């Protein structure tokens, strides 16, 4: 551990006149990027390191950084770019939104969250050419089938799910607004009473409620009874009722996409900590499906079976991240 610390300090020290006293690695398990917190006396800086072959990703980050700042969205300040693959950023601290209780969030930060959603939606669509369109939705469903369904088929054949997934894909509204893409509690930090956005580099054009459902049906925090209150606050802020059908279709797709991500992390990357988020996400999906009485019969049977199977396995073997 001491040797690693010395190597890290030596690596970063060449970029600074001030002495670096400590370098702390920040865990980011689902990312190819590496994050470090650099301690230079009383000053603290975040170093975000990209692989050297990811120059386009750095350029994408900086493009959206400039775009979102122009629209008054709160982001960590970029201080410098080193060797075309290291970003030096403002330290926003260690408090993420999911470190708070749901009651604290709804009472203390719901207004700020609505303002963030409004500012994101106000960014012009032509700020990005990336779209959550029919082709992208098909890719995400295929990803789910490859990385989650392949491990939890519960006796179902892939081909019988495809029709329902395709019907869902076709029924989701076209991209209408600029969206953060991953507007959930782990990508919102709290510093001195103010909320900040991180991991915004995958922003795209999306259906109108995409960021809202990402917030409300968050796999990392369960808002329980406060979900309805969030919707009411959103409707009041927008002076318009939410279209429940499109809202829940979007939420259903978003949560199925999340299962694909968790399956990839657990089974491909051997990142077992993501197992704990599968069952809550399945609970959201089963709840969404109850709204659609005459649609998605196969998906209802499949996700109900998966939930029962995983719950039974946990009761039998206990929960483990090993």
Image (cartoon, rainbow, N blue to C red):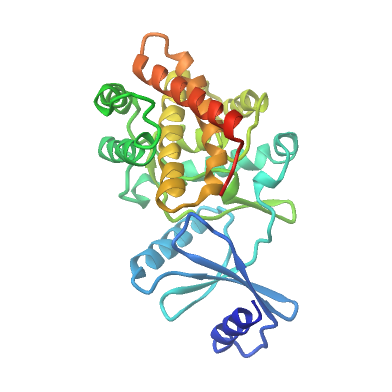
Q: Is residue 140 left or right of residue 214?
A: left
| Residue occupying the point 59% across, 26% down | 231
Q: Residue 98's x, y, as percent?
A: 65, 44
| Residue occupying the point 58% across, 30% down | 316
Q: Nearer the viewer, residue 238 or 85?
A: 85
- Residue 236 in sight in this render: yes
Q: In which quarter of the image is the N terminus?
A: bottom right
Q: Residue 56's x, y, as percent?
A: 34, 66
In the current view of this chain or complex, which residue is farthest to the top? 294
Q: Is residue 242 above or below residue 119?
A: above
Q: Nearer the viewer, residue 124 or 208?
A: 208
| Residue occupying the point 43% across, 74% down | 85
Place residue 249 in its image quadrant.
Answer: top left
Q: Residue 44's x, y, as percent?
A: 68, 73
Place residue 175 in its image quadrant.
Answer: top left
Q: In this view, does 216 lie to the left or right of 106?
A: left
Q: Residue 219's x, y, as percent?
A: 55, 37
- Residue 123 in sight in this render: no
């Amino acid at each position: 551990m001491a040797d690693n610390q010395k190597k890290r300090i030596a690596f970063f020290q060449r970029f600074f006149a001030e002495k670096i006293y400590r370098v702390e690695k920040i865990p980011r398990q689902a990312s190819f990027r590496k994050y470090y917190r650099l301690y230079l006396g009383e000053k603290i800086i975040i170093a975000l390191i990209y692989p050297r072959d990811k120059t386009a990703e750095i350029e994408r980050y900086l493009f959206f950084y400039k775009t979102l700042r122009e629209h008054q969205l709160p982001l960590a300040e970029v201080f410098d770019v080193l060797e075309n693959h290291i970003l030096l950023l403002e330290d926003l601290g260690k408090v993420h939104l999911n470190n708070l209780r749901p009651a604290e969030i709804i009472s203390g930060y719901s207004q700020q969250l609505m303002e963030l959603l409004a500012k994101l939606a106000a960014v012009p669509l032509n700020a990005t050419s990336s779209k959550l369109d029919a082709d992208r939705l098909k890719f995400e469903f295929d990803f789910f089938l490859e990385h989650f369904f392949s491990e939890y088929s519960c006796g179902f054949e892939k081909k019988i799910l495809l029709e329902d997934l395709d019907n869902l894909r076709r029924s989701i509204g076209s991209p209408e607004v600029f969206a953060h893409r991953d507007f959930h509690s782990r990508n919102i930090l709290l510093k001195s009473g103010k909320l900040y956005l991180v991991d915004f580099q995958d922003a795209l054009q999306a259906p109108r409620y995409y960021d809202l459902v990402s917030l409300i049906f968050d796999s990392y925090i369960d808002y329980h009874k406060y979900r309805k209150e969030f919707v009411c606050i959103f409707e009041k802020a927008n002076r318009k009722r939410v279209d429940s059908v499109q809202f829940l279709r979007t939420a259903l797709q978003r949560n199925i996409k999340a299962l694909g991500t968790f399956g990839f992390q657990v089974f491909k990357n051997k990142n077992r900590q993501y197992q704990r988020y599968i069952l809550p996400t399945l609970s959201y999906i089963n709840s969404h499906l109850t709204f659609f009485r005459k649609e998605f019969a196969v998906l209802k049977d499949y996700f109900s079976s998966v939930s029962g199977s995983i719950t039974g396995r946990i009761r039998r073997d206990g929960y483990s991240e090993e």
